Image (spheres, rainbow, N blue to C red):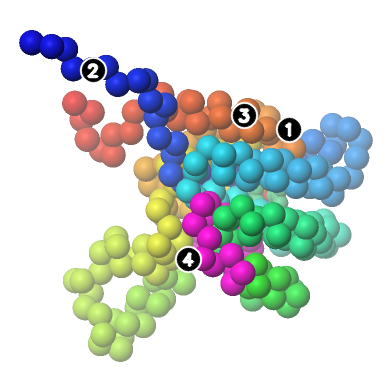
Amino acid sequence: MSQPIASPALSPAPPRHVAIIMDGNGRWAKARGLPRNLGHRQGVDAVREVVRACGRLGIEYLTLYAFSSENWKRPQTEVAGLMDLLRIYIRRELDELARSGVRIHVIGDRTKLAPDIVELISDAEARTRENRKLTLVIALSYGSQDEIVTACRRIAEQVAAGTLRVEDITAETVADHLQTVGIPDPDLIIRTSGEQRLSNFLLWQSAYSELIFADKLWPDFSPDDLAAAIDEYHRRERRYGGSGE
Ligand code: IPE
Ligand code: IPE
Ligand code: MG
């Protein structure tokens, strides 16, 4: 009997959804005697490179934690600097993102954002709506607990109105009321800067995500570091509660 023809070694499919907690900009600046906002500015360069790399790697969804609901506590000058960087990033990158097939989607509490930023992100979303190569989800003024509370309220309203029965509430019902509805859960969550916590990021959606903590500070994180994290992801065994056999 003839042997089956060996198929060439295929590289494993990339994770469908990578989410990144981009941490360490402040420490990057401090280590150089620079103001924190220069660390954030340097962090934008890392964002640009990592977004491009995700396109090359065939990743379908990239979620970037850009600003948490708790980051409003920071000094006003730092918050203003971060918001300015967001304006600059979207204005400068939108053409390239739109051309290269990136769909932009922003999650988080928009009521706290300046009106011009709300307009900028709504326009960016509208302009890139039909793109399918990579969905770039930007978590901005985002907090997972708030997101879950809002979902609970909306579900409770339907129960109160008599349009939903309590016994019909499932995990899917909850997921459908989160801001990430329609987006697959992250396969891989990377946090830079050595901190090992989620800081209110995608708490529901990360139930079975692989977590990778990288020591590098975000401005130093390169496409090679992303590739290394993906290699490590491929070495993990995802069991989802099964026995793995
Ligand atoms: C991450 O860097 C960027 C944001 C949270 C907006 P940090 O500003 O948290 O940097 P560190 O953690 O102080 O070094
Ligand atoms: C998490 O980083 C938020 C973002 C990266 C946007 P933080 O620096 O705010 O988190 P903590 O305070 O160290 O937990
Ligand atoms: Mg931090």
Instruction: Locate residue 42, reporting x and y percent.
Output: 80, 42
Cα–Cα span, label 3 and label 1: 9 Å
Q: Looking at the image, which residue sits at the far right?
A: 33
Residue 215 is left or right of residue 182, and the answer is right
For the residue pair 179 and 73, the one nearer the viewer reads as: 179
Q: Quadrant of the C terminus?
A: top left
Tell me the residue at 53%/60% (across/down). Answer: 131
The residue pinned by badge 4 equals 179
Callout 1 crowding tier (Cα within 10 Å): few <14, some 14–19, many ≥20: some
Q: Which residues are magenta?
A: 125-147
Is 110 above or below relative to 211? below
Q: Of callouts 2 and 1, which one flags the residue occurring earlier in the amino acid sequence?
A: 2
Q: Is residue 88 magenta?
A: no
Whether the residue carrying mark 1 lies under 8 Å from ligand 1 is answered with no
Cα–Cα span, label 3 and label 4: 29 Å
Tell me the residue at 49%/57% (across/down). Answer: 132
Could you say whether the residue bearing mark 2 is in a helix, strand or loop? loop
Could you say whether the residue bearing mark 3 is in a helix, strand or loop? helix
Amino acid beneath label 3: Asp
Instruction: Locate residue 165, reporting x and y percent.
Output: 21, 78
Cα–Cα span, label 4 and label 1: 30 Å
Q: Looking at the image, which residue sits at the far front?
A: 2
Cα–Cα span, label 3 and label 2: 35 Å
| Res. 225 mark | 3
Amino acid beneath label 2: Ile
Residue 148 is left or right of residue 26, and the answer is left
| Res. 5 mark | 2
Tell me the residue at 25%/38% (across/down). Answer: 241
Residue 76: quadrant of the picture: bottom right
Instruction: Locate residue 103, reporting x and y percent.
Output: 56, 60
The residue pinned by badge 1 equals 220
Cα–Cα span, label 2 and label 1: 44 Å
